[in-house]
Amino acid sequence: MAATGLAGARAMNGRLGNERGVALVIVLGLVALIAAWAAEGAYEDMIAMRRAENFQQLVRATMANESALALAVQVLGKDAATSQRDDLAEPWAQSAPPLPLDEGTVEGHIEDGNRYFDLNQLLREGKPNPDAMHMLQQVFARNGFDPGKVEALVDWLDRDDTPIGPGGAEDAAYYDRSYHVANAPMRRWNTLRKVRGFDDPRLLRWLRRVCTVVPPTGKPVKVNVNTAPEAVLRMLFPRMSKADAEALIAGRPYDSVASAVAGKAWADAAGTQRLSVHSDVFIVYTKAVFGRVSLRERFVLYRDQKGIRLLLRERII
């Protein structure tokens, strides 16, 4: 009997030990699970806090860029009231160091949008502009690019659906694309990449040196002879040599187009008509940095007798 009782006690103790072991495993498992939940919750809280902080910093960066824009508008407004011409020695054209703000910085500069040839000028009253087309085709050929691509660009811009020439490209030429021809002026430079034949990086890099895209203003966008670089001046005047362009630039600023081209053998009527000594399009570049957020933006402004208005705002990635 004693032996039987002892054996039973041992068996019971074994079962209790096993149950304690199982219970311990369960407890440890629950502790690990709770710890994992806690860690996940803490991580999610951290992510939420980080997102909130980033959003707050983005708001501050946006407001800082808008403040820089407001300052640029003020400078350009004062310039319009005190100057009859625009040149690179004026206050608006000068660069400034980053301005420290509360836990951040903001910087910006103004570029003359009239120092380049506006590609939307390939149209005149919604129809192809033969003079501008011919000029750009000549420049393409001189720089080793297919002049037929200019026709594809004109077809992208003009209102009709008939190819303008052998290099033209209306909807049928975009059968393998996920979009159609716009048949309207461009508002952004990046739109150019969609045009048939303009996905060539080398072509785009070269165009950046001489051309721009100005959202439609209802008026022709001329080239400012006081700010245009050599390559743009030589694009407008096919007979102008490098030395001619350098001499013209050395004589700046000019109070009138007539004084700039007077007595110049390279000057022709078509190029002269595209010139001006004042600017109405300005591009404001801003950059604000707050914490982990760096926000770069581009604002295109149009200035006339009525004041200054915003044509385009876009984030620079």
Image (cartoon, grey):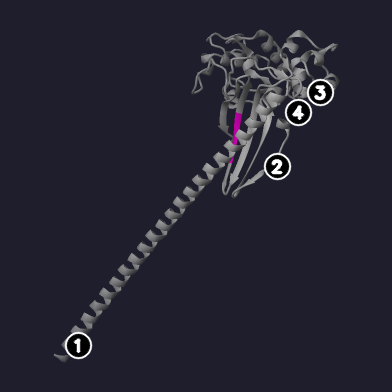
Residue name at image x 60 percent, y 32 percent: 298
Q: Nearer the viewer, residue 152 or 159?
A: 159
View extreme (front): residue: 81
Does residue 298 belong to the magenta stretch? yes
Which residue bears the numbered disc 4? 88
The residue stretch that appears in magenta: 295-299
* Type of amino acid under label 4: Leu
Where's residue 2, x and y in %?
16, 91
Q: Nearer the viewer, mark 3 or mark 1?
A: 3
- The crowding category of the residue bearing disc 4, from other C-alpha atoms within 10 Å (few below 14, some 14 to 19, many at least 20), is some
View extreme (left): residue: 1
What is the CA distance from the residue labelled 2 to the residue labelled 4?
18 Å
What is the CA distance from the residue labelled 2 to the residue labelled 3?
26 Å
Image height check: is 246 above or below 21?
Answer: above
Which residue bears the numbered disc 3? 252
* Type of amino acid under label 3: Arg
- In this image, 46 relative to 162: left or right? left
Q: Secondary structure at mark 4?
A: loop
Does residue 6 belong to the magenta stretch? no
What is the CA distance from the residue labelled 1 to the residue labelled 2?
92 Å
Q: Quadrant of the C terminus?
A: top right
Q: Secondary structure at mark 1?
A: helix
Which residue bears the numbered disc 1? 6
What is the CA distance from the residue labelled 3 to the residue labelled 1?
115 Å
Where's residue 36, x and y in %?
39, 60
- The crowding category of the residue bearing disc 2, from other C-alpha atoms within 10 Å (few below 14, some 14 to 19, many at least 20), is few
- For marks 4 and 3, the one nearer the N-term is 4
Q: Nearer the viewer, residue 311 or 242?
A: 311
Image height check: is 19 above or below 108?
Answer: below
Q: Which SS does the magenta portion mostly show?
A: strand
Residue name at image x 73 percent, y 14 percent: 138
User: Visible in this render: residue 37?
Assistant: yes
